[in-house]
Amino acid sequence: MKINQEGKEMTGKKEKSIEKREKRLQEISLLRTIPYSDHQRWWSAETIAIVTGANRGIGFEFARQLAGHGLTVILTSRDTSVGIEAAKVLQEGGFNVDVHQLDILDDESVSEFTKWIKEKYGGVDILINNAGVNYNLGSGNSMEFSKQMIETNYYGTKNMVKAMIPLMRPSAAGARIVNVSSRLGKLNGRRSRIEDEALREKLSKLETLSEELIDNMVSTFLIQVEDNTWQSGGWPQKFTDYAVSKLAVNLYSVLMANQLAERAEGQKIYINCYCPGWVRTAMTGWSGNVSAEHAADTGVWLALLPNKEVTGKLFAERRELKL
């Protein structure tokens, strides 16, 4: 009898959670039907937005939605032919989309892409760092691909930020960088908490946060993965390598936002992160509960916010999350 009662309570909680989520998704859908007001529209067809890893999934939706708002979108893909085919779909729909090969882990590829952007467009206004990987699906927590995940999700994102900042064009609205991240990368998250209090303290304060500290954190993690001591190292115990990679992205974004805030008016660059949720894409094995269309919404919203002062934050479903 007691078991039945507990089962009913669990079912009730699950139903309430689903109901709450559906209500929130309906609210977001309504917001998406309301066009941005003309007096808030700071962009035009001359505004250049780059989307990495845009040949499918959330990246493709970023490209489609930004182009739908009237921007010029540069769709990038590691595979040239796949990127061209994805761009054709949007171009045939009347969208202003260009395409170029880009491997965010290949210095030569990043350098070539940077040169091409500068020569053809003169600069860039928006960067969406979407390219990323996740090898842990369902309840699995394999550390087999930890190095690839850290390199792609963290170092690849950092490569693009550093490459594009010199090309970001001055404007009254400010340039924008949006990093696709995760709530699993919250420093004090319920499921992704860093147990080392001294490290957590240093990472949580701007006066002690540094690129070197973040790099050392991920390096220490990878060393412990290599010698199989990571479980006692105080790292998140679920989706561990993914959580660490996205924590690094979130912290780096906070650090850069603080540094970029020192720029003079007209030279500002605003950088934010957001969690798209568990999305039905190839990355999740199509097991997610959020469509790519809904998942891309918050990132597009952040990229086009008329309130340019929002920077160094983590968002999910158009709401700020505490890092």
Image (spheres, rainbow, N blue to C red):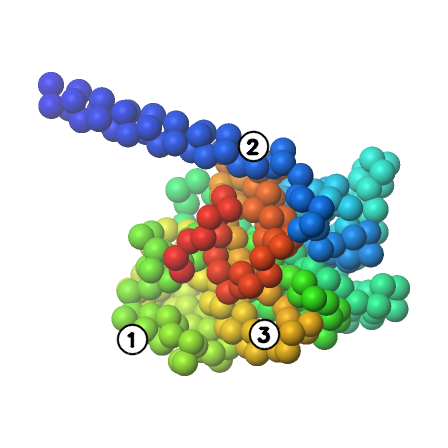
Amino acid identity at mark 3: Leu
Amino acid identity at mark 2: Leu
**Pick the front one: 225 or 314:** 314
Label at residue 30: 2
Amino acid identity at mark 1: Ala
Classify 10 Å Cα crowding around label 3: few (below 14), some (14-19), many (20 and above).
Answer: some
Residue 239, visible in the rendered structure? yes
**Pick the front one: 249 or 172:** 172
Quote the CA–CA distance across marks 2 and 3: 34 Å
> In the image, residue 10 lies at what x, y percent?
25, 28
Marks 2 and 3: which is nearer the front? Answer: 2
- Residue 292 location, quadrant: top right
**Pick the front one: 257 or 200:** 257
Residue 53, visible in the rendered structure? no
Q: In screen coordinates, is 90 left or right of 277?
A: right
- Residue 131 location, quadrant: bottom right
Label at residue 260: 3
Quote the CA–CA distance across marks 2 and 1: 44 Å
Label at residue 198: 1
> In the image, residue 100 lies at what x, y percent?
81, 56
Which residue is depicted at the point 27% across and 25% down?
12
> In the image, residue 110 lies at what x, y percent?
74, 67
Marks 2 and 1: which is nearer the front? Answer: 2
Task: Name the element at disc 1.
Answer: helix
Which residue is depicted at the point 63% across and 33% down?
33
